[in-house]
Image (spheres, rainbow, N blue to C red):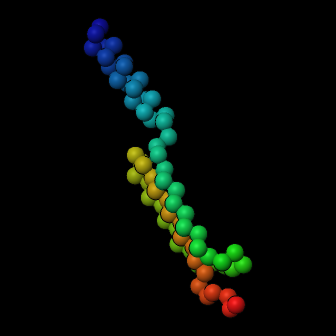
Amino acid sequence: MRDRRIGLLVVAALLLMLSVRHPTADIRIITHDRTDLTPQRVQAALDLGVFAVSVLVTWTRHLPSV
């Protein structure tokens, strides 16, 4: 009876862990000019199940002449 109770607690703890969202890092480096309608961009995402990382980097290829 005691082993069954421990097993039930372990299963309940595992189900609780599965229901919690894993942490996600969202990194955005926006360096393009606001008037640039088509900025250059690199975007990547990595999700390992335990945590996730998303990276977005934008830039302007040609700076406007002043």
Q: Residue at x 31, y 17 (%)?
A: 6
Q: Is residue 40 left or right of residue 48?
A: right
Q: Quadrant of the C terminus?
A: bottom right
Q: Judge whether 21 appears above or below 27 on screen.
A: above
Q: Residue at x 59, y 69 (%)?
A: 30
Q: Position of residue 15 (x, y in %)?
A: 43, 29
Residue ranking furthest to the front: 66
Q: Is residue 37 visible?
A: no
Occupied quadrant, residue 39: bottom right
Q: Position of residue 8 (x, y in %)?
A: 37, 18
Q: Is residue 56 visible?
A: yes
Q: Nearest the camera: 17 or 27?
A: 27
Q: Residue at x 58, y 73 (%)?
A: 31
Q: Quadrant of the N terminus?
A: top left
Residue ranking furthest to the top: 1
Q: Nearest the camera: 56 or 16?
A: 56
Q: Position of residue 37 (x, y in %)?
A: 71, 78
Q: Judge whether 62 appears above or below 19 on screen.
A: below
Occupied quadrant, residue 59: bottom right
Number of numbered discs on residues: 0
Q: Residue at x 61, y 88 (%)?
A: 62
Q: Judge whether 3 appears above or below 18 on screen.
A: above
Q: Position of residue 36 (x, y in %)?
A: 69, 79
Q: Nearest the camera: 52 or 8?
A: 52
